[in-house]
Amino acid sequence: MSLTTSRNNELLNEIDIDDHDREDSVDLSMQHVQNQLKPCYWSNLNREQKAVYILLIIVFLLLLLLIVVIVSLQQNVKASSTDCNTNSYPIEQQHDTDNLIPDDFVNNVRVTTPKNLIIMIGDGMGTVYNTAYRHYKGQDRTYLDHIFKGRYSTDPLNNTITDSAAGATAFSIGKKTFNGNIATDVHGNPFGTILEALKRKGKGTGLVVTKSITDATPASFASHTLNRNFQDLIAKQLATLHQDYGWKNCTVTDILMGGGKRFFDSWGFNESSYSDYGWNKYLNDNGTLYTLCPEDLPVIGLFADNELPFYLDLIHTENNQPSLLDMSRISIDLLNKTYNDEGFFMMIEGSRIDSCGHMNDIACILWEMEQFIEAVDYVIDWAREDGETLVVVLADHQTGGLTIGREDSFEKDKLFDGYSLNGMTEEDILEYYGDYKVNPLVTSKDSDAITTTTYQWHPEAIKDIKYTSQWFNQTVTAANGTMDILSILHLIEDRWYPLSAKEKAFLNYTFVNGGKMDQALVHITNVRTVTGFTSHGHTAVDVSLYAMGVSADSFYGHWRNDEIGQLLSRIMDCVEEQNEQTSLLQNMFVNGTLELCDPKQKPPILEYNNSVPYPFGNLRYPQNCVENW
């Protein structure tokens, strides 16, 4: 048994060894086969097969990329569809190109906060005004041209063409509103202005203008009314709102300078009472302006009953009224010394550029531009040396539709409709003025007069003019009918220019027929210079934006006027303070301590004949702002 068992074990061991040898042999064989197959599969493919494989891989990658793009576009379409009604414009004004513009244009530009902000506004100063001034001065570029940044639209929410109230309100509160509204929205609710917000931050503030300080532009920065014609109420708010706010030892504006004395006199603010309202100094002439020192703030300067004189009249007349440059220079110096650490805000307005545009008086326009540019030059030089100031130069709109050049083929029967020259017909104009073909500066035949006058402009024709047409009208009116036509013609030749025989005949015809002599004189000047106008009102054209100093490059491109107001608040980092001021104003309005209408001063508005209702959406709707007159 033992021998048999031992033999069996030996046989089993041999079998086991053989099995292991076979398994090892098989494993080695399989590994050898695999090693041989790996390098052989791709190398065994021919060129066409390899090309097919590569093409399939490329197609697969392209399909994958296409899927990613489609998913991304679907997400963008979904996002844009949820925001399609966030634009402030009506749906019908939106276009497909809106998707190319950032939804929040104001917050997509880089800004740097300056210490000081000076806003300069040329009221009615369209881009062509600067162009005309450049040609008049014989310059390649004006100071404004050197700091040009872009342009902007000026339309309000209820019209295509804005007035100064809606235009300035867009800058001051960053919202579009209706024409006539002063720092209130379309519902007539008051909103905090950038001036009020910066005063909350502890900065100095000032308003300097050449019209009444209660006029629409300055009023929109420091008062709140339903209509710009409530000028007595605006004056009261400018002088006393700080008391209503509960601000002690602090007026809303540190400096108020301009005209408008009669709107303060009407409710008792004058040389004797100003200190009762928290003001330290009251000025009424140019001499006292230069006696100011920082300790005199807050100061109010009222240098005319309403508007200051036109610059052309001012420099040729002995008076004690300051120029825009005088007021700007003194105000900047005072604010900078008093608020050297905190900084200051100023709004400086060349207000009467607009008045000249309404009169279509090119001589008046160019001289008001002279005054404004002088102030701009000074401010820019000061800001450049200071290094911590942003200067922004704006216009609320364009006035008059000024054109450099005029067309002789203008309808002759419509020529004088806007001038009220009492019955001038086409035949009268041809007989007494020879159509537009009569230009004393050019010699031409009737056949070539159109070409000669159309493609020339002669601003040098006004170089000897010493007064505006308004001064002429006031002088003739003051004579109470004692000036005959010969005296009037002598006055014109002494203060304007020598007249041609046809011009004398034209003026004589106007005088005999009771026409407006000042407007006839304006027309002669416009024909001499070959200057055209399309309107005695405002126009809706875009206007230019100029800026220099800290964050000036934030203004490149095209804007809406309300976006400029929003951007200014963002640059000055005062959005929170502006919101706080809005809350204060609206609470005061609801509880009756802030009035937006003056029941004693009826504005010349047809809808206000019987009462002044609050608009729908107003915090006090459906009450009336004025119950009855």
Image (spheres, helix red, strand yellow):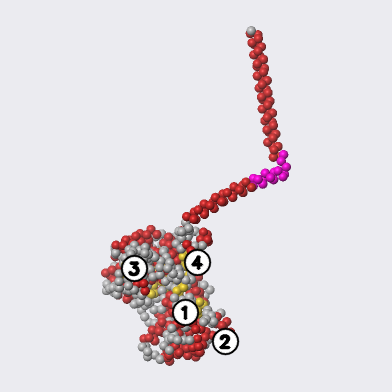
User: Residue type at mark 2?
Assistant: Asp
Residue sitting at x 39%, y 60%: 574
Residue 26 pos. (x, y %): 68, 26
Q: What's the CA distance linking mark 3 and mark 2?
A: 59 Å
Find disc 1 in the rendering and name its residue. 362
Query: Circle 3 sits in a helix, a strand or a loop, which is it?
Result: strand
Query: Circle 1 sits in a helix, a strand or a loop, which is it?
Result: helix
Between 510 and 395, the one nearer to me in the picture: 510
Query: Circle 2 sits in a helix, a strand or a loop, which is it?
Result: helix
Residue 524 pos. (x, y %): 48, 84
User: Residue type at mark 4?
Assistant: Gly
Residue 126 pos. (x, y %): 47, 72
Question: Cβ–Cβ below 8 Å for labels 4 and 1?
Answer: no
Is residue 418 depicted above or below 615 in this figure? below
Using a 10 Å C-alpha cutoff, classify the residue at mark 1 as few (fewer than 14 neighbours), some (14 to 19) or many (20 or more): many
Q: Is residue 213 visible?
A: no
Q: Earlier in the sequence, mark 4 or mark 1?
A: 4
Question: From the viewer's perspective, is the residue at label 1 or at label 3 nearer?
Answer: 3
Q: What's the CA distance linking mark 4 and mark 1?
A: 25 Å
Is residue 424 depicted above or below 144 in this figure? below
Q: What's the CA distance linking mark 1 and mark 2?
A: 26 Å
Find disc 2 in the rendering and name its residue. 446
Question: Which region of the structure is painted magenta?
Answer: 44-58
Q: Quadrant of residue 22?
A: top right
Question: From the viewer's perspective, is the residue at label 4 or at label 2 nearer?
Answer: 2
Q: Earlier in the sequence, mark 1 or mark 3?
A: 1
Find disc 4 in the rendering and name its residue. 150
Picture disc at residue 613: 3
Q: Quadrant of residue 299?
A: bottom left
User: Residue type at mark 1?
Assistant: Ile
Is residue 184 depicted above or below 9 in this figure? below
Question: From the viewer's perspective, is the residue at label 3 or at label 2 nearer?
Answer: 3
